[in-house]
Amino acid sequence: MNAKLKNSDLFARVISSIVMIFLGAFFLGIGGTIFKIILILISAILAWEILSFNNLHKHLRILTALFFAFIFATNILFSQVLSLILFIVFLIFYKIIIKHNDYTQRAIYLILIFFSLITLTDFRLEVGLVQTLWVICCVIASDVGGYFVGRIVGGPKLWPIISPKKTWSGIIGGWLFTMIITYIFVILFKEIEFYLLFFSIFISIFSQFGDLYESFLKRNAGRKDSSNLIPGHGGFLDRFDGMIGAFFAVFIVNFINININNWIL
């Protein structure tokens, strides 16, 4: 019976992975308004999953998630300044409705999600498809490298209370795999320059942080998965946690670069 359940779960996981890869590549390749609409929908789902940690009433959770998506849509379609004002209002509203000790931890993650999605949108539409694919592949390489090196090498656990299976060897393995995938991109695409080989480690670190932070929130909420929306995988947060961290790293670098340039000018 257990073997059948495991096989069924594995089959669902494989099929879901294939569908996600196909849809992700399709919408990423199209770009434009359709890409923005998809990200707006994803932002609503991610917010809905975070809000589910608070056991809010279903209708209130949906309305709050839609409010979050509306703010994100305002940023990428209309006005960045207005969206930032609305986002501050959202965080205050969130504080009022949850009345929970974990507000700060979850609010921080909502901030990460908000700015990561904005960065992903800008990166795809203004920087380019190849560069966006590179960041996403760095996240995948970090995840895969961490898993296999951690399994093969083993060693001291990174944070047993939060993520019992993660090891320090897996963390370093993730960095190495990320550098390897970046080197492949350097060879294949002129858009990816050699110095990004070192920046890829920074992306890997933030990707791993995104993964760990989501595990931390789930552990505090007594949850195994963020939801059951993706068969065999859990929820959208369980799949996007690494990307949230990685694109927040890109946001930080871009923010620092803009401010340095303004200061020089």
Image (tube, helix red, strand yellow):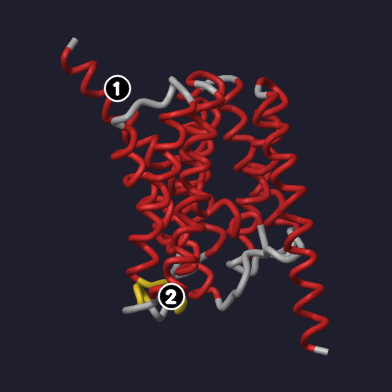
Q: Amino acid at mark 1?
A: Ile
Up-down relation of residue 6 to residue 230 (above or below): below
In the image: residue 74, left or right of residue 264? right
Look at 33% across and 60% down and name the residue there. 172
What is the quadrant of residue 228 in the picture?
bottom right
Q: Which residue is farthest left?
A: 264
Mark on residue 162?
A: 2
Find numbered disc 2 in the image and state the secondary structure of the residue it sits on. Answer: loop
Look at 49% across and 52% down and name the residue there. 242
In the image: residue 226, left or right of residue 203? right
Mark on residue 191?
A: none
Give residue 123's position: percent from left, percent from top.
49, 27
Look at 41% across and 38% down and name the residue there. 182
Give residue 75's position: percent from left, percent from top.
54, 27
Q: Quadrant of the C terminus?
A: top left
Give residue 54's position: percent from left, percent from top.
59, 67
Q: Nearer the viewer, residue 3 or 232?
A: 3
What is the quadrant of residue 32 in the picture?
top right
Mark on residue 258?
A: 1
